[in-house]
Structure formats: C-alpha cells, structure tokens
Image (cartoon, rainbow, N blue to C red):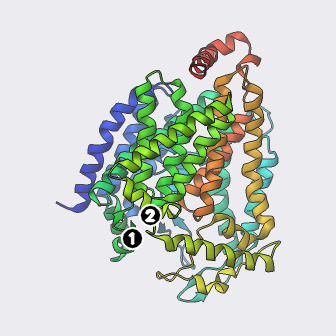
C-alpha cells in the first residue's frame, strides 16, 4: 500500500472521531450547518491532498470547493482558521512568460484568494453601499507603513551564491504579496468579526483545528513517523526532502503534523490553549474543560519545542493576572502548573523533558541555545551599525553563523526585522500589535464588572498576543507564526470596537444571550 494512502487512513482514523467528539462543543459557538460544511471541506481537502500527485492538482480541485464554502459560510474567518493547517505549507511556483515565475502559491494563499479576498471585497462594497466610512485608523497606517518598508527596502535572495538584483517588477510583486498575504488578512478579520459571536466563533474554529492537530502530534511522537511528510516529499520532488526536514531532539521525533515545522505546531497549540482558556468558561462539564487543556498540552509536548512551552505558560500566567482576583488566580494557576509539571516529571516523559531544559541540567540540543546567543550578539553588532533602516545585506556579513544546511537561521523575529528594516521597522512592526492589545485591554478593563464574559474574551486575546510576542523571540517569522500574528491583531482590533452588554438595549442583549453568558461566567468565577 502506498505510504500516502497508509498515512491518510491513520489521519482519518484520528480526526473523524475527534470531529464527532468535538461537535457538541462546537455547536455552542456555531450553527450545525456551518459546522458540518466546514468539517466536510476539511475532510475532502485532506483526502485530495494525500491522493494528489502534485500541488497543482490539489489546487485545481480545492479552489472551487473553497470559493463555494466561503460563499455559504456565515463567518468565513472561522472557515479560514479551521483550514489554516489542513495541509502542510508546501509551495509551488506559478510560471510566467518572460520571468522566472510570477510568485509562489501555497495553502495560505489559496485561502487568501478564495476565502479572504472575496470576503474583504464584500465588506468594502457593503460599507460603500451603506455610505459608511471604511474606518482606516492607526492600526491600518502602522501595518501599511511596515509593508511599505518591506517593499522599498529590498532584502536580496541568494541563488547559487549569487545575490539576485532588484527590479521594478520585483517591487510590484512584493507590494502585491504584502497586500494579499498580510493586509487582506488583517482587514478581513478586523472588519468582518464585528460582533462578539463572530469573534467567539472564530476562536472556537481555531480551537477545533488545534484539537485535530494535537492527537495526530501524539501519534507521530509515539510511532516516530511524520504523517504528512510523504505528502510534502512527493509534492516537493526533492529526493532528500524527508531526510532534510524530519526533526529530532536527541533520539525523539518532534511532531509537526501539517504545520510545516515542530515550532509552528507548538505555536498553534499554545494559541489554541489560550483561546480555550476563554471558551471553557462556556462549557458546563468540568471533565470536558480539563480534557481540552490536557489535549492541547499533550500536543505541545509531542512537538518537543521549548519556545512554545514557555509561550503557553506565559499565556496561562497573563490570563490569570488580567482576570478578576488576579492574585488568587495567579496562585491557583501557579499551583496547578507546579502540580502538572511535577506529575510530568514523575511520568515516563519526565526524563525527556529534563533532557531538553538546560536550567535543569539538560544537554540535548543545548547547542541551539548557544546559537541563539551568538545570533543575538552578532545581530546587535550589525543593528548598531545601521540602526534606523537596517542593512539589507546583513546576512552576507554573518557567514560565521552559517549552519550545516548552508543557511543562516535567524531564529529571532525581532532580530530579523531589525537587521533588515532597522529599529524604525521594528517599531512599526511592534506598534501594530501592541496598539491592538492596549485597545483590547482598555475595553476588558471597562467591562470587568458589568460584562465579565466580554472581559474574559479580551483577556484571552491579550494573553495570546503576549504569548506570541514571547514565542517569536525564539523563531523566524514563518508559516502560521506570521498568519496568526495578524489574525490576533485583527481580532483584538475587532474586539476593541465591541459594546459591553450593560450598554446595549435590554432587548438586544437578551437576543444575543449576553446576560445569560455573563451570569454563567460570574458563577464560574465565584466558585
């Protein structure tokens, strides 16, 4: 039996029961029709992906399916988040006459073209039809300012040890891809998630996607077999792909599933855990609430990535610190984490965890931490030489950090941005997400007493933003790291425009179910 078919059978055997188990919870946040459609699209795309001999056949079949599903969905952002990691981010070049290629196409851009772009166009037209302003504000300006820097300041690629020169066509390509990859994503999320229900549904869809990834990650760790690797290797046409991209920590396989990298998988699960901290307040069963936390952390440990472990812990701490009765919540969260960590160390996994924690005497992959320290020192030297707009040739001056694969791995997003776009670039990059977070924090503070459910939602978003800022310090800005950074910014911006239930007309609040939700949260907080 072909390895792709075998892997597909295992994937379906894991995710189909997970969809069945998750459906009663998912229906608390979305309609049954939307849930069934999204589930079916996820399963169909997965089957097509494993059985397609090339990415282009997958794209040919996926495009009409995605367009049709997005048109019918009441919340296309939720559909986007569920499908974000439905297949690995393998890319293929779009051929063009007269140039090497037009640009690369992958699952992220398929979703952008088929789901987000039509959604943004509909939103734009609806605003114009209503004679209402689009509402460009500081967040749009900061994001577009950062995009302008990435277009104007060209960071050359190296091909066969030759630096590729820039051109007007190349600059146009960068501008177009920034618009499609980043701005449309932020615009669609921030403008269309215009109600509390839409934001919560988006969070629930992402949690569902992570609930599918987590058990597959545990399977990969236990069987030491990457389920999606054969698909990636087949589409890449690289006979060494499997060997080059399979990651181990010591002798243990680091799960990656369809995320593209173990660090990315860990990041997705950490954010999913942060969203679940809010969603579980709407779940009556204590067993289900605990099972959700355990599921995401099981996947986190399977990814075997230290950065996401720290990020997930940061999310839990910030979530506890920003809630009501912060001191008691922090003590409770600290005690629970200490108990869980102690139980983990006493389990068969304990020795593996200790081995990768230098603070506890671990030595496995300790050279990665040494490399990060060298990278930070060398980066600061170069940033000091070109502090304002960076040095676009910085990588050519960092040959001493070139690794065995022949690459210089900038495993620090802050260093990468500052090196190439200077401290000005780093300022606008961070100002975007921090402005969104502070706006969300302002609403959460105002709603803390009158609308605890709304405050708890904002606390979850802020905690995930803080966790993201922690995690990108130990990873390049790749794959879902980039996408979720702007998704979180968009969700925080949308959240900041919401109105607390206490300020709504009673009939509207009752229609939205906000009074009941706030009462449930208040009772859970007072236990």
Marks 1/2 in contact by CB < 8 Å: the verdict is yes
The x and y percentages for residue 391 are: 74, 78
Question: How many numbered marks are there?
Answer: 2
In depth, the one of 157 and 428 nearer the eye is 428
Q: Is residue 132 left or right of residue 66?
A: right
Image quarter in which the C terminus is found: top right
Q: Is residue 419 left or right of residue 62?
A: right
The x and y percentages for residue 513 are: 60, 16
In this picture, is 320 found above or below 342? Answer: above
- Residue under circle 2? 90
In depth, the one of 206 and 136 nearer the eye is 206
Residue at 66 percent of width and 61 percent of height: 178
User: Quadrant location of residue 446?
Assistant: top right
Tag 2 or tag 1, which sits nearer the N-term? 2
Q: Let me know if residue 87 appears in the view.
A: no
In depth, the one of 432 and 288 nearer the eye is 288
The x and y percentages for residue 150 are: 72, 67
- Residue under circle 1? 236
């Amino acid at each position: 039996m072909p390895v792709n078919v075998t892997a597909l059978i295992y994937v379906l055997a894991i995710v189909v029961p997970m969809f069945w188990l998750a459906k009663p919870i998912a229906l608390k946040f979305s309609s049954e029709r939307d849930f069934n459609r999204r589930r079916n699209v996820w399963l169909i795309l997965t089957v097509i992906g494993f059985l397609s001999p090339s990415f282009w056949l997958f794209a040919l079949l996926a495009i009409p399916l995605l367009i049709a599903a997005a048109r019918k969905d009441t919340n296309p952002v939720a559909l986007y988040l569920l499908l974000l990691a439905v297949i690995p981010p393998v890319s293929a070049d779009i051929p063009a006459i007269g140039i090497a290629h037009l640009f690369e196409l992958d699952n992220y851009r398929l979703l952008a073209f088929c789901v987000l772009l039509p959604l943004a166009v509909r939103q734009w037209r609806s605003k114009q039809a209503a004679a209402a302003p689009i509402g460009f504000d500081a967040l749009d300006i900061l994001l577009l300012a950062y995009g302008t820097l990435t277009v104007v300041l060209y960071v050359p690629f190296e091909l066969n040890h030759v630096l590729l020169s820039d051109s007007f066509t190349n600059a146009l390509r960068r501008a177009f891809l920034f618009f499609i990859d980043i701005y449309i994503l932020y615009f669609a999320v921030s403008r269309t998630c215009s109600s509390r229900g839409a934001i919560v549904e988006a969070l629930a869809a992402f949690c569902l996607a992570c609930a599918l990834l987590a058990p597959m990650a545990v399977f990969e760790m236990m069987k030491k077999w990457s389920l999606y690797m054969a698909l990636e290797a087949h589409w890449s046409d690289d006979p060494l792909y499997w060997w080059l991209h399979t990651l181990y920590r010591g002798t243990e396989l680091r799960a990656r599933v369809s995320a593209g990298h173990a660090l990315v998988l860990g990041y997705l699960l950490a954010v999913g855990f942060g969203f679940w901290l809010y969603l579980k307040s709407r779940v009556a069963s204590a067993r289900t609430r605990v099972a959700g936390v355990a599921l995401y952390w099981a996947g986190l440990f399977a990814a075997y990535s230290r950065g996401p472990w720290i990020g997930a812990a940061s999310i839990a701490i910030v979530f506890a610190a920003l809630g009501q009765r912060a001191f008691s919540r922090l003590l409770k969260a600290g005690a629970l984490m200490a108990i869980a960590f102690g139980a983990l160390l006493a389990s068969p996994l304990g020795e593996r965890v200790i081995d990768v924690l230098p603070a506890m005497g671990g030595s496995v992959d300790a050279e990665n931490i040494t490399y990060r320290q060298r990278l930070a020192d060398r980066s600061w030297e170069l940033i000091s030489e070109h502090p304002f707009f960076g040095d676009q040739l910085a990588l050519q001056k960092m040959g001493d950090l070139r690794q065995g694969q022949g690459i210089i791995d900038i495993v620090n997003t802050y260093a990468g941005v500052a090196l190439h776009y200077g401290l000005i670039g780093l300022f606008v990059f961070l100002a975007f997400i921090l402005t969104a977070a502070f706006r969300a924090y302002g609403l959460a503070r105002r709603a803390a007493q009158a609308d605890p459910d709304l405050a708890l939602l904002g606390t979850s978003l802020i905690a995930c933003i803080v966790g993201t800022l922690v995690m990108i310090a130990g990873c390049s800005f790749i794959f879902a790291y980039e996408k979720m950074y702007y998704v979180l910014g968009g969700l925080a911006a949308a959240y900041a425009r919401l109105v607390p239930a206490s300020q709504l007309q009673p009939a509207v609040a009752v229609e939205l179910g906000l009074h009941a939700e706030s009462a449930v949260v208040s009772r859970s907080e007072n236990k």
